[in-house]
Image (cartoon, rainbow, N blue to C red):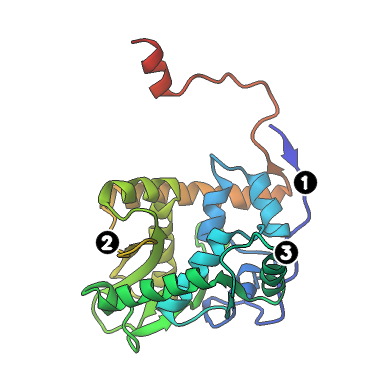
Amino acid sequence: MTVTELPGPSAPAAGPIVDRPGIYEMSNEQYHADPVPGGSLSSTGARRLLAPSCPALFQYERVHGQAPRRTFDFGTAAHMQVLGAGPELLVIEADSYRTKAAQEDRDGARAEGLVPLLRAEFEQVQAMAEAIRQHPVASRLFAPGSGLPEQSLFWVDQATGVWRRCRPDWLPYPTGGRLIVPDYKTTVSADPRSIEKSVYDYGYYQQDPWYVDGIRSVLGVEDVVMVFVFQEKTAPYLINVVQLDPAAIRAGRRRNREAIALYANCNRTGQWPGYSDRVEIVSLPAWAEKQENQ
């Protein structure tokens, strides 16, 4: 197995140093810079450690970050409009990024920590937020005054001593009953079958128990349920609110335990393996093999 030895995580941006479990208010940049001395593991990181990714990719992105992409800009802007929190938006008065001037405006905005959006994209995310406000379920989940957006939670995994973290889109105020925690996702299609595929492909079935673990640990609330608010990115911006079934959550929890153990071992040894260091035997995908044998 190929082992990539890389330096530890970069120093966090100026802000709080997290040395005890709790809820912290900090910027998105401070959260992703990881303010825990020695490092902590997020849900996204846990997913990045495991196949089809690998520890070497996780550690590289941990040190160097991910390159900005338009899909990230759009998703961040939609979150900001729905949640009322997040980085400032900068509207680029252009139809596209084909011109050098528009590209320079976009890159300059990112360099200043702003989220660039073309005018049409800005109008699009505004319309999406309005659709959320009109939806009978989603509007209540994100109701102003019912909770706080983008709070950062940090806690210690009891089995391994690994620091864990999460940043829920919306953290409702505890009321003494069940705590329903919504997470907002933009998508191409919000029909149930497409959502099932997204839940698996993007690891949302791991995100659910990860966030529930964090909220239980930090808030001391046992009855916690997570729901996902999926919204299509094209008009009429349809919405589907879903809750994962117990089998999906059990599978996600198993994957999370595997990732935490792997992270602890990589941290201890300082070695972050790649895919493989030997010749692997590769088969055709099952669908292709079936087609060839017809």
Quarter in which the N terminus is drawn:
top right
Foreground: disc 1 or disc 2: 2
Q: Residue at x 31, y 74 (%)?
A: 132
> How would you rate the neighbour count of disc 2 (Cα within 10 Å): few for under 14, some for 14-19, many for 20 or more?
some
Instruction: Give the left or right position of residue 198, taking residue 108 as reference.
Output: left
Tell me the tag on residue 233.
none
- First of labels 1, 2 by sequence position: 1
- First of labels 3, 2 by sequence position: 3
Q: Looking at the picture, how far across and down is residue 101, in whole percent?
A: 71, 69
Label 2 sits on what residue type?
Answer: Asn
Quarter in which the C terminus is drawn:
top left
Label 3, secondary structure: give it: helix
Instruction: Give the left or right position of residue 4, taking residue 17 as reference.
Output: right
Foreground: disc 3 or disc 1: 3
* Residue designated by label 2: 240
Label 3 sits on what residue type?
Answer: Lys
As drawn, the residue found furthest toward the top would be 293
Q: CA distance from mark 3 to mark 1?
A: 39 Å
Nearest the eye: 210 or 143: 143
Residue 18 versus residue 61 in the image, above or below? below
Tell me the tag on residue 100.
3
* Residue designated by label 1: 5
Nearest the eye: 98 or 37: 98
Residue 224 versus residue 62 in the image, above or below? below
Q: Residue at x 57, y 78 (%)?
A: 87
Label 1, secondary structure: give it: loop
